[in-house]
Image (cartoon, helix red, strand yellow):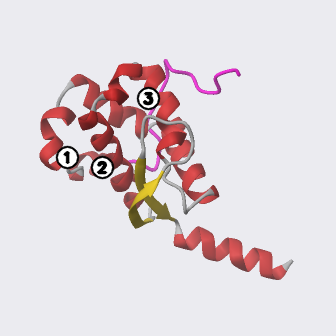
Amino acid sequence: MKNIYNPVTLERHPVIGDDFYRAFDAGNLAPVYDSPEGARLLELLTSVHGICALVGAVSAAPTKPPMPAVEGMIRDQLGADVLCRHDMKQLTGRALRQIVEYLGGEWEGRGTPITVTSQFTKGSTYSFPDFQRREKKRREAE
């Protein structure tokens, strides 16, 4: 299947402002976040392609963790071995939660099994309540 994103021009999504980066809390994963791989991971997840994949995954399946939606991009950009590291998987999860909350989404729960082939085995689920309310109203109007 053809790649639909340009790995060279991963520019930041316009909705992600500098305030997101200033407020980002890596917690006990700060050493990993401060590494070149950690910085590149956050850059990738906040890119146009990363945000679109994340929002699409959460909107399409709010009962499923969104990690598999960005896993291929992470593997392409940082290498397959990065997702074998537990600390990078944790940083991915922490970053995804903060991105979803920054975009107005809500954390729903953790420890949900990932049922597709993935380096991740469990993850958190999220929702975009405003989006889901509008979608429900649209369906009722039909």
The disc placed on residue 123 is none
Give the extent of the magenta segment: 1-16
Identify the residue shown where x is 42% and y is 40%.
120
Q: What is the residue that sits farthest to the right in this orientation?
A: 142
* 23 or 82: nearer the viewer: 82
Q: Quadrant of the C terminus?
A: bottom right
Identify the residue shown where x is 51% and y is 47%.
54
Identify the residue shown where x is 36% and y is 29%.
83
Going from the N terminus, do you reach mark 2 or mark 1 first? 1
Please say whether residue 4 is one of the residues in the magenta stretch: yes
Is residue 47 at all visible to an observer of this figure? yes
On the image, the x and y values in percent for residue 12 come to 43, 36
Give the side of residue 111 with respect to residue 85, left or right.
right
Looking at numbered disc 3 in the image, what kind of residue is underneath it? Ile
> What SS does tag 3 mark?
helix
- Residue under numbered circle 2: 94
Looking at numbered disc 2 in the image, what kind of residue is underneath it? Arg
> What SS does tag 2 mark?
helix
Q: Determine whether 114 is above or below 34 in the image.
A: below
Q: CA distance from mark 1 to mark 3?
A: 18 Å
Label 3 crowding class (10 Å Cα cut-off): few <14, some 14-19, many 20+? many
* 16 or 110: nearer the viewer: 110
> What SS does tag 1 mark?
loop
- Residue under numbered circle 3: 74
What's the magenta bit mostly, secondary-structure-wise?
A: loop
Give the side of residue 67 with respect to residue 85, left or right.
right
On the image, the x and y values in percent for residue 123 come to 41, 52
- Residue under numbered circle 1: 26
Q: CA distance from mark 2 to mark 1?
A: 7 Å
Looking at numbered disc 1 in the image, what kind of residue is underneath it? Ala
